Amino acid sequence: MFISYHCVSGFSTSPDLGAGTIFLQSSMSSKGSAIVTGAASGIGRAIAIRLVQDGFDVALFDLPSSQEKLDTLTEQLKQTSGPRTLTVLGDVSVEADVQALVDKVVQEFGGLDVMVANAGIAKVAVLHETSVEDLDHLYAVNVRGVFLSYKYAIIQMLKQGRGGRIIGAASLGGKRGVLEHTAYCATKFAIRAMEYGKFGINVNTYCPGMTETPLLARLDEVLTSKSGEAKGSWMGQAKNRNAIGRIGAPDDVVGLVSFLASKDSAFITGQSINVDGGNYFN
């Protein structure tokens, strides 16, 4: 994997840190350290910005193909005084990449307090049209990737002995089936049950409804292409399926994640919380 190191505001790195591209931003103070996977765009990007605003040192993790987007985000976060940012390139489905990510965060930030396993993908297809390759890819990112993120975060948190927060991205598809999303829904059901409360490690998931992200735009493009409708019409219809009457925005999700990452959520664990404008009542 390509390795490149850059120093911002007086921090330096050394080539022995391993795979990935790292950018450091200086810190005045921090309330802890956090990792956000899938941080280059959409909900992950918004979460990363919010956690920096909350005072966390934040590691931004995404695929090498997202480097330009991560560079742009890093430049934006440089305007925020205080917390540091650490950008690492890798794949959540590759164990060595996730382990190296956690190791880098511990080396640079001194520990890990919050893991936001946000990275995820979707595939639009009914079951009999879903290939084994598509299924394997979905499970690699949505299940294996989350599992690895949880695993290495928990290993580190147990070593530290001070608890922590594990926050996963599920969706409404993790609570009920969605037409033409059979395999996707199965992957989201799979991440809901991990309990480490007795160690002070809280594990929760946020479940966004229709949220305006690049992923949703791609789904709209695929579905309207199949139906012959105008591009954007599927998203237009979707906003009428919830009580509030609009598509969600990434910023609608970040408040919940901010709360789950905070001390205020100390007595909340094992929960999957909807952020869907009232699309699904439970």
Image (tube, helix red, strand yellow):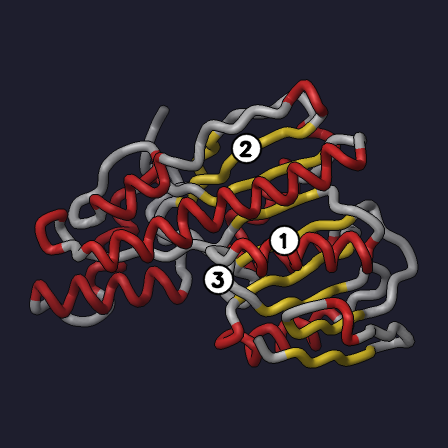
Q: In which quarter of the image is the C terminus?
A: top left
Q: What residue type is labelled 1?
A: Gln
**Which is more foreground, mark 3 or mark 2?**
2
On screen, residue 75 versus residue 43, left or right, reads: right
Q: In which quarter of the image is the N terminus?
A: bottom right
Mark 1 Cα shell of 10 Å, populated few (<14), some (14-19), many (≥20)? some
For image coordinates 59% across by 47% down, the residue present is 116
Which of these two is toward me, 238 or 120? Answer: 120
On screen, residue 178 versus residue 102, left or right, reads: left
> What is the distance, in whole Å, between disc 3 and disc 1 at their CAs?
24 Å
> What is the distance, in whole Å, between disc 2 and disc 1 at their CAs?
21 Å
Q: Which amino acid does label 3 sit on?
A: Gly
Circle 2 residue: 204
Q: Is mark 2 on a helix, strand or loop?
A: strand
Tell which circle, 3 or 1, labels the residue nearer the N-terminal end: 3
Tell which circle, 3 or 2, labels the residue nearer the N-terminal end: 3
> What is the distance, in whole Å, between disc 3 and disc 2 at their CAs?
20 Å
Q: In this view, does 155 lie above or below 180?
A: above
Where is residue 85? Give x, y as percent: 74, 64
Which of these two is toward me, 132 or 175? Answer: 132
Circle 1 residue: 99
On screen, residue 118 versus residue 232, left or right, reads: right
- The reply to whether dot 3 and dot 2 touch (C-beta < 8 Å) is no
**Which is more foreground, mark 3 or mark 1?**
1
Res 91 visible: yes
Q: Is mark 3 on a helix, strand or loop?
A: helix
Q: Which amino acid does label 2 sit on?
A: Asn
Rendered image quadrant of residue 150: top right
Circle 3 residue: 42
